[in-house]
Image (cartoon, coloured by chain):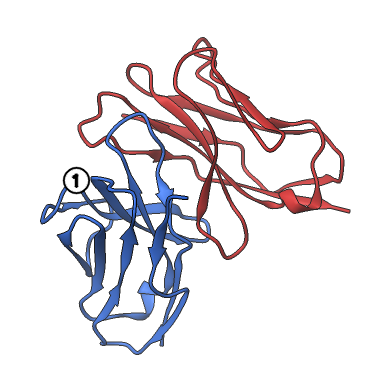
Chain colours: A blue, B red
Amino acid sequence: DVKVTQSSRYLVKRTGEKVFLECVQDMDHENMFWYRQDPGLGLRLIYFSYDVKMKEKGDIPEGYSVSREKKERFSLILESASTNQTSMYLCASSLPINYGYTFGSGTRLTVV
Amino acid sequence: GNSVTQMEGPVTLSEEAFLTINCTYTATGYPSLFWYVQYPGEGLQLLLKATKADDKGSNKGFEATYRKETTSFHLEKGSVQVSDSAVYFCALRPLNNAGNMLTFGGGTRLMVKP
């Protein structure tokens, strides 16, 4: 079964900390994505990547960066965590066209 | 641009009731259409998909038909169970989009009561 694995289900971090959210897929997918999900706001795209070392900003990239050094791994970085980044973070991967995305189980991040 | 509109929730039904969640879309060309389901505390799971007009996607008793003439992809189930309580997302993926990005609807929460 194909899998997207997010390293943590729950995280609690302090304001100002640098936070790394890791995502690994075992499907050899080119495309990988990071979303955040908040009540009433739906899914919002933070960053995506078409290939190794390649990244594109999504709709809400401010306060975030990403890293894709290997095809299977896509990391989301909160440079200096703030309380308004408390959210559910979802990673996904896909083939280029005509297919849906495969999502990870999500990481619920709380910044205190 | 591309967009997906879903009915507002929550939708509250009794067990064994008939379910319809409406989804309409705007897109150039002929996108692929998807329904995802998100159970509490989980990520999104692909429920079903259709890639061309008049295709019917089906899975776990759910089905949806790609209607090009009405630009719709409504989700239906004949008899819902308590375990179907979740948030359902309609999405489209255009074939010619340079980013091949999924566009999601806002999600519809379904609550099924025993």
Is residue A45 rendered to the left or right of residue B86?
left
Asked if B19 appears above or below A39 in the picture, the reply is above
Asked if A103 appears above or below A79 in the picture, the reply is above
Q: Nearer the viewer, residue B65 or A104?
A: A104
Asked if A69 appears above or below A42 in the picture, the reply is below
Q: Regarding mark 1 in the picture, which secondary structure is present there? A: loop
Rendered location of residue B24, percent (x, y): 52, 26
Residue type marked 1: Tyr
Q: Look at 84% across and 53% down and name the residue there.
A: B113
Q: Which quadrant of the rendered structure holds the N terminus of chain B?
A: top left
Q: Look at 41% across and 88% down and name the residue there.
A: A112
Q: Quadrant of residue A13?
A: bottom left
Rendered location of residue A76, percent (x, y): 26, 67
Residue labelled with disc 1: A50
Q: Mark 1 falls within which chain?
A: A
Rendered location of residue A70, percent (x, y): 17, 60
- For the view shown, which residue lies furthest in the front direction? A1
Rendered location of residue B82, percent (x, y): 80, 52
Q: Nearer the viewer, residue A59 or B16?
A: B16
- For the view shown, which residue lies furthest in the left direction? A53
Is residue B4 rendered to the left or right of residue A18?
right
Dot 1 surroundings within 10 Å: few (below 14), some, or many (20 or more)? Answer: many
- For the view shown, which residue lies furthest in the top direction? B69
Q: Look at 35% across and 90% down and name the residue there.
A: A14
Asked if A93 appears above or below A99 in the picture, the reply is below
Is residue A27 rendered to the left or right of residue B91?
left
Q: Quadrant of residue B103?
A: top left
Q: Nearer the viewer, residue A47 or B56?
A: B56
Tally of numbered discs: 1
